[in-house]
Amino acid sequence: MKTEYRDLNLRRQRQDYGSDPLSVRKTDHYQAEYIQSFVSKWDRLIGWDLREESEGDFFIDILRRHGVKKILDAATGTGFHSIRLLKAGFDVVSADGSPEMLAKAFENGRRQGLILRTVQADWRWLNRDIHEQFDAILCLGNSFTHLFAENDRRRTLAEFYAALNHDGILILDQRNYDVILDQGYRSKHAYYYCGQDVKVEPEYVDEGLARFRYQFPDQSVFHLNMYPLRKQYTCRLLREVGFQKIKTYGDFQETYRHEDQDFFIHIASKQ
Ligand code: SAM
């Protein structure tokens, strides 16, 4: 094998955080984190059937209540929500910045008899690559946490805002980082990452970094370096870019005790 091919193959198999992984705090790094070998295991991590069971029709009900027809799934990943929403009859465009993720989503769709309309697009330049307006944009699965610079977060939300119709909604979720930062990590493992045989835990946390470790049954280990968003901070940013109403659910419930939740789901409305 030629050296370049061997290097390329290695890059597809192994994540590279260099000699000081805790110093890797860059928005662009998601491209290098979602390598083929990790992406091929992602569905094992999220456990589609259990995730579907735990979410129920939460998103479908909200989208119908808002009269949504056309959706941009901005963080498609391997296609979990795109596929559910296509099956439920919505018109869905599936975007993601990672070509590896999009390829896997397309394959997952095809296996279920669906052709996903995929677009590779980084959120920061969304409207450069996607020239359509949507009734709803989804940024789910704790994806917004990949943005490390405040400028990137503001810019992304402004791009989402601009791609929404006048009465559109943004549905964006996040881990409950407040609890992780203030009290330490615990999880019900009931939502999002429902795979029963995958060990997920933070390896390191400070106000600027949450480094999570994912260990699979074959002993392979991957990491994600993420920015630990505090809930009030996310709500403030949403308000500051122009969203008029923000309703936050805790683990899919309307009323909840802040410290008992694993995830928050924000519904931000333009009107
Ligand atoms: N929504 C999926 C789910 O719930 O399984 C995937 C979640 S995964 C944690 C985060 C996704 O966000 C990845 O597919 C990644 O490629 C994408 N992503 C991260 N930063 C991005 C950016 N700046 N622009 C576009 N996509 C990005």
Image (tube, rainbow, N blue to C red):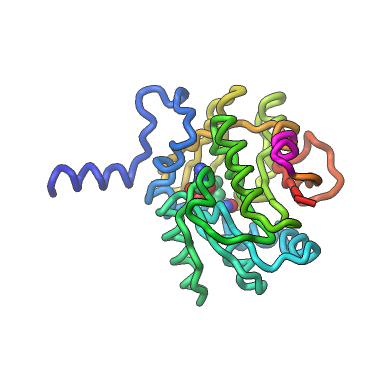
Within the image, what quadrant is residue 90 found in? bottom right
Residue 237 inside the magenta-drawn segment: yes
**Horizontal and vertical percent position of residue 152:** 55, 35
* Residue 43 in view, yes or no: no
Residue at 50% over, 53% down: 96
Q: Nearer the viewer, residue 211 or 265?
A: 265
Farthest residue, direction bottom: 113
Farthest residue, direction right: 255
Q: Nearer the viewer, residue 38 or 66?
A: 66
Number of numbered callouts drawn: 0
Magenta portion: prevailing SS class: helix
Residue at 30% over, 42% down: 11
Residue 18 left/right relative to 229 = left
Residue 86 inside the magenta-drawn segment: no
* Residue 15 in view, yes or no: yes
Q: Which residues are magenta?
A: 236-242
Residue 271 left/right relative to 116 = right
Residue at 56% over, 63% down: 93
Image height of 68 relative to 185, above or below: below
Residue at 72% over, 65% down: 68
**Horizontal and vertical percent position of residue 67:** 77, 66
Image height of 111 relative to 43, above or below: below
Residue 51 left/right relative to 199 = right
**Horizontal and vertical percent position of residue 7:** 22, 42
**Horizontal and vertical percent position of residue 234:** 70, 36
